[in-house]
Amino acid sequence: MSRLQYILFVFIALLCQVILSQELPPIQNFTPTDYNSESQNWAISQTPDKIIYVANNTGLLEFDGSRWTLHPSPNESIIRSVKVVDNRIYTGCYMEFGFWEKGNLGVLTYHSLSDSIKEDLLKDEEFWGILDMGQWMVFQSHNRIYTYNITDGTINNINSDVFVPKVFKIGRTVFFQKMGQGIFQIRNGEEFLVYDDEMVRNDEIINIFEKEQEILILTRNNGFFRTNNGSIEKWDTGVDSLLSEISLYSALELKNGNYALGTISHGLILMDNNGSLLTTLDQGSELQNNTVLSLFEDIDNNIWLGLDVGISYVNVGSPFHVYPDSGGLVGGVYASAIFEKNLYLGTNQGLYFKELGGDREFSFIEGTGGQVWSLTVLDGNLFCGHHTGTFRVINDKVEKIADVQGTWTVGKIDDMPNLLLQGNYDGLYVLEFLNGAWRLKNKINGFDHSARYFELYGDNIFVNHEYKGVFKIEVNKDLSEAIEVKNDTVIRGSNSGIIKYKDNLLYAYKKGVFKYDSGKNAFIKDSLMSTLYTEEEYVSGKMIVDSRQRLWLFSNSNINFVSDGGLANTPIISRIPLTEDMRNGIIGYESVTPMQEEGRYLIGARSGYFTVDTDNFGINDFNVGIRTVKKADRNQSVSENNLLDSHQKGDFKSEENSFEIAYNVPYYNKYLRPLYQYQLIGIYPNWSKWSEEPFVSFENLPPGDYTFNVRAKIGDKVSNNVASYEFKIAKPWYRSNLFLILYVIGAILGSIAIHGSYRQYYHKRQQKLIEENQREMALAKAQNEKEIIRIKNEQLQEEFRSKSNELAASTMSIIKKNELLSSIKQQLISSEEDKNTVKPIIEIIDKSLDRNDDWEFFKEAFNNADRKFLKKLKKAHPELSPNDIKLCAYLRLNLSSKEIAPMFNISPRSVEIKRYRLRKKMNLTQDDNLVDYILKL
């Protein structure tokens, strides 16, 4: 390696170290996956409404701040150039150049200009450059320059037999380089050689700039040159050594007069208008690729980079600057401090420092390896709270003053300048300044809880423990022992914090910010401070009071700070709209340090830190626009068939009732994202919640008139306008006015028909009820009659039983009487007394026995009991004699021959004979039972 090469190597290494030690502007990277296209991007341009267009290997990329859209090139070739002029987007590719225009539906349509001269194009010609010259558009290939007259559409060309790398617009003229010949100018359609110096003949010119009525020429390999009274001379810059060792590919003069240089392998170089280096951005500083193919400065002064792999933009004017620590040099920043012109960082890896404004990288301070919890400047001393104890920092060295494990932080004790109070993992300790040095004096006995946050307020020490609540500690005069410890467990929560601010003791946790009321001995919610965040927005209750007396507090969506209201007593609350995921903070361990510049602050992050300029934090006015409206048919792909004109009121059929509406704010800032809010008047009159989603879908909307409104906000600033789209969904055919009239007529006729039908129905039902009632009455009558018959039958049966009993009684009476008379007669006959005396008595007995009165009485009783029997018997056997009938009656009563004999005043034997003769008369066989036969009659 030669001495010169060695010097250059050292210079580049030192330059990289300088860059790595700087805070860099935010860089937003887009990978090919993000924009869904090929990697290389050859040119970039922007429309007046801030839409970005990129010439890509696959086609024309469009970016509206929310989404990327790819428009394939007209002949499936690489698009090499793009230039936006008014509402046209001019592009050049292989054997083709023309322009794109948007129609009413927001769809780009390509119009070829080269078709008219297609036969005249050179073989394999590609168009690498496009210039806007007012009435003419200039299209440049490597061997020809075409001029297109916008007014009459004519196309002329200038040929070159050598390689033409690029074309340049200087004032109202066109310059271009012919390799090996020099720099030419086009005048009145003709080329003229203007510079043929050696340095511009053989080294490719990257760009030509106007500078103080002269021109500045940037070459690929040899840096800058400038014209001076018609000659070319070297322009010495602060980066000449770097430029001589690297190769440039693109360059751009920024609006503020600075220069952006795109290299082939070293990323982006930014230099001021005097040639001094401002910064470099490469893969070591979050740029995704080191080959910068194209550069563009947008309306908001962001620098866009078309890379060999991907697309990036740099927010050079951003109030944020980042120290990314991509290499993990310092780690996560838990604390920071500016002390004696040095910047100190307390990280999870140890304590680092560098000189403020210096070019050197951060240096590690020996003996501080491990977790640093705090850096505190007190009375001209810098104290470091460390996992291993407490250090006093002296420039690039430290002095250990307390060897107690785990020092959270160190604080002052009012009216005791020689004492300090420190919180540790296991309680509170006192430091003492003695004999010119700080040392550990004692621990406060009686309190052994972790004291990460503590404040002296009044005569007490308040310690916040996020899991156990707030401790109020009364200590003795020499700070050696806790006399009384009270624990308030009502307020406690994860990542909570306590701090003293403007003579007030504040406590913050999920429920809000509370202020200590000494009279009530309790924390009372502060209505003003609690507006700093909502319960949903809460992430950390850690509060920081900086040296400028600003109170800082972090929420999910903002970094909040409270400053003095000046003449007003009410504090001023300001918000920096930087979300938790964007700031990459260490939740619960946030840190804020004022820098030397007024309004600039350093805020720690998980990897490195970032700075913010609160005095330069302004958001320009912006508008929200409706990008596309399309019918959201799930079975239909996105095409012009379902895209709608967002500028005209829509009129849709009833079945066309689902839509997707996309909207955007073309705002390009890595850390500030637009939020959107919409309403659909006609069904959803209330505004929706703020969301990052740049579109919304509505499905199955009912018929009616609708107005869709959308607005946006960035931080606390709301868009200037509310974008609207009106549309109407028709009623279905069966709900049209004609059908409504028919429905009314039908309803009337139907009502009449239904009324008649109901009348007929109720008439039939009434008749049916009448018939049912009649049947029920007839049935009831029949049942009543049946019941009457039953009762009568029961009465008859009862009467029959009574008659039968009378008949039986009369029969037995007759039998007994006759038996008695017969017995008396037999005794009289057998008496030996005077026969003549008893003879009259016997005659009387015989006369009584022969009398027919008993039979008539029996007959009457028998007829009452069984009146049909005698009739049936006489009808069946008319030849029977009265005695036969009498015998049948006795047999009907189932009397035996012995019982019948007295009734006839004969012997039982004679009754048997009578029975025999009766059988004969009735023609009964020997097998027939006489009594059974008589009973069956």
Image (tube, grey):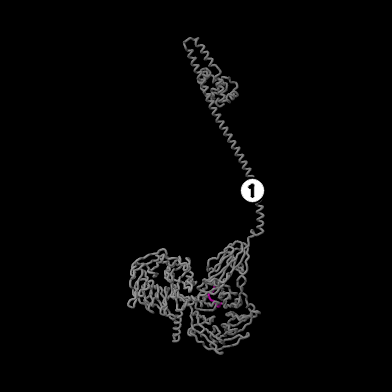
Image position, residue 174 (x, y; %) = 59, 84
Quarter occupied by residue 208: bottom right
Residue 784 seen in render: yes
Residue 837 or residue 655, whichever sits in front: 837
Image position, residue 549 (x, y; %) = 44, 74
Look at the picture and state if 90 lies above or below 809: below
Image position, residue 437 (x, y; %) = 34, 77
Residue 720 or residue 263, whichever sits in front: 720
Q: Name the residue under label 1.
A: 758
Say if the magenta span includes residue 244: no
Quarter occupied by residue 800: top right
Neighbor class of circle 1 (other Cα within 10 Å; few <14, some 14-19, many 20+) is some
Residue 63 seen in render: no
Q: On the rendered image, what quadrant is the C terminus found in? A: top right
The span picked out in magenta is 37-44
Image position, residue 26 (x, y; %) = 49, 76
As drawn, is 553 to the left or to the right of 47?
Answer: left
Q: Could you tell me how many numbered marks the image carries?
A: 1
Look at the picture and state if 896 lies above or below 229: above
Look at the picture and state if 716 lies above or below 825: below
Q: On the rendered image, what quadrant is the N terminus found in? A: bottom left
Determine the secondary structure under disc 1.
helix
Kind of residue at disc 1: Tyr
Residue 386 or residue 804, whichever sits in front: 386
Look at the picture and state if 928 lies above or below 139: above
Quarter occupied by residue 697: bottom right
